[in-house]
Image (cartoon, rainbow, N blue to C red):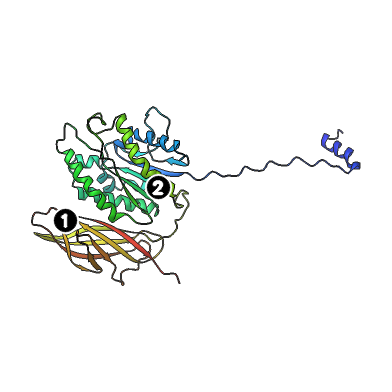
Amino acid sequence: MRTPLLGLLAALLLPFGLILAPPAAAAPAADTAATPVRIMPLGDSITGSPGCWRAVLWNRLQDAGHTDIDFVGTLGPQGCGQEHDGDNEGHGGELVTQAADQNLLPARLATTLPDIVVMHFGTNDVWSSIAPDRILAAYTKLVGQMRAANPDMRILVAQLIPMNPGSCSGCAQRVVDFNARIPGWARSTSTSDSPVTVVDQWTGFSTVTDTYDGVHPNAAGDDKIAARWYPALSAVLDAGIPDGPGDPGDPGDGRPACTAAFRATNVWQGGYQGEVTVTNTSTSTVSGWTVTVVPADGARLTQLWNGTLSTAADGTATVTDATWNGTLAPGASATFGFTATTSATAGTPSATVGCTARAAASS
């Protein structure tokens, strides 16, 4: 029987006090790679068909050292002539009101688990003459769905690029009118845990030189859009992202969160009665809530029940719970009602609402 070579060497060296140790197993490489920050570009064809501003933005971020990022979406790249992460959520022809009414976003969020949403959405709604109040209500619903998926979601919302197609003489002014409403909506919707940042994509953008059809950006327009997104997105990345739902098994951190939904229950000339439903969307009990109500068309809240009202000079109302209806278990809701005065020529009642919640005191 032949002696194995290693055993033979050991036998020869033993008298000299030496022994061959078996070769050490290679130490596993340390996993030092950080989890990339997941960024969802959200919108319509301006974002996704092919939405080449995303390619420009991706490469600018990479060149600046933001290499730990991952663009995410259920749609893949559509060319653009340069290497980039092309995943996105830009659905050509889609209306933001359609996405809200049909609850299209939650499944997309569950699939992609973003930490940041970069949203240029509403061009098709403006083209379709949908009222700004209704578009902003859709924005609010989408933001609520984003926060239900990730309470720390960072949200960048664009003031839309100009639009002046030959088939829509009123579109240019309608974009201006809608964009003017976005900053106020953002202020009432933003929270410390999930800030909403407005990015001005309108100023300095020309439908003549920066689009190929009065609506969709050409190469010059792509560069301008990317240049506007870059500082806002870079600032969010530099500030750091709290641990979010990047792991599909993450149950969340249990911090308080809530949503608010408005509806008109009765309407008469010169006024209406409204109702707001507050829902605890977090995984823990909340001990109180505060809702901001920005009524449209110059309406003013006059009487309120099931809450405490304060009103700013611009008509923005702040409503806090009435103590007895402030504590909400996960998924539970409370309502408050109010009456409001309007002008005799006001349209269908609407309001932009936002909600913040307070954590229950620990025992």
Please provide percent x and percent y for residue 236.
40, 47
For residue 236, the mark is 2
State the residue lying farthest toward the top.
Answer: 81
Left or right relative to 336: residue 61:
right
Of 188 and 21, nearer the camera is 188
Residue on which disc 1 sits: 349
Image quarter where the N terminus lies is top right
Q: Residue furthest right?
A: 15
**Who comes first in sequence, dot 1 or dot 2?**
2
Query: Disc number at residue 82?
Result: none
Secondary structure at badge 2 equals: helix
Q: At 35% across and 48% down in the image, what residue appears?
A: 155
Give the Cα separation between the discs numbered 1 and 2: 36 Å
Label 1 neighbour load within 10 Å: few <14, some 14-19, many 20+: many
Q: Residues within 10 Å of mark 2 (few under 14, many from 20)?
A: some
Residue 233 relative to residue 95: left or right: right
In the foreground, 50 or 317: 317
User: Mark 2 belongs to which amino acid?
Assistant: Val
Viewer-side label of 1, 2: 2
Q: Is residue 112 above or below residue 169?
A: below
Residue type at numbered disc 1: Pro
Is 214 located above or below residue 99 in the figure?
above
